[in-house]
Amino acid sequence: MGMRRPSGRRFSLGRRLRLPSRRPFDRLPPPMPEIFWLGFGIALFSALVGLISGARSRSTGARTGLAIGAFLGVLAAFPFLVIGLSTA
């Protein structure tokens, strides 16, 4: 025989679970705009290229290449980062 539902009883999660009126995730800030993440990606890619080129170089190290790549990446992506931060 199949399972029978008790008569007059609804299976609703809303009635069984009592959720508090204020949940902790109700006041999350809106996500960052896409243009910010574009600039962040440009800066991250440039830092990665600097890290790799610094690691392969004979005259400098990986940390120096990373620092130079991050600096140039932030300079290149600065307009995107600022627009993204100002519209957030």
Image (spheres, rainbow, N blue to C red):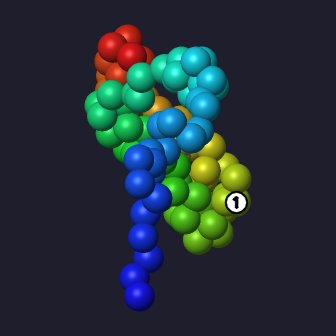
Question: Can you say which quadrant of the picture contains the N terminus?
Answer: bottom left
Tell me the residue at 62%/24% (across/down): 20
Q: Is residue 8 left or right of residue 22?
A: left
The image quadrant that residue 43 belongs to is: top left
Give the residue at mark 1: 61
From the image, which quarter does the C terminus lie in?
top left
Residue that sits furthest to the bottom in the current view = 1
Residue 43 in view: no
Q: Whole-percent x and y of residue 68?
A: 56, 43
Residue 79: where, in percent of width, then height?
33, 22
Image side of residue 88 versus residue 57, left or right:
left
Q: Is residue 61 above or below residue 9?
A: below
Q: Residue furthest toward the front?
A: 7
- The quadrant holding residue 40 is top left
Nearest to the observer: residue 37 or residue 72 = 37
In the displayed structure, would residue 10 be above or below residue 25?
Answer: below
Q: Position of residue 48 (x, y in %)?
A: 51, 56
Residue sitting at x 48%, y 37%: 14
- Mark 1 is on which residue type? Gly
For the question of whether residue 55 can be seen, the reply is: yes
Q: Residues within 10 Å of mark 1 (few under 14, many from 20)?
A: some
User: How many numbered discs sit on the rendered protein?
Assistant: 1
- The residue positioned 29% from the left and 31% from the top of the image is 35
Q: Quadrant of residue 56?
A: bottom right
Which residue is more in the foreground, 74 or 6? Answer: 6
Q: SS class of the residue under badge 1?
A: loop
Rendered view: 35 above or below 87? below
Q: Residue at x 45, y 48 (%)?
A: 9
| Depth check, front residue: 8 or 69 | 8
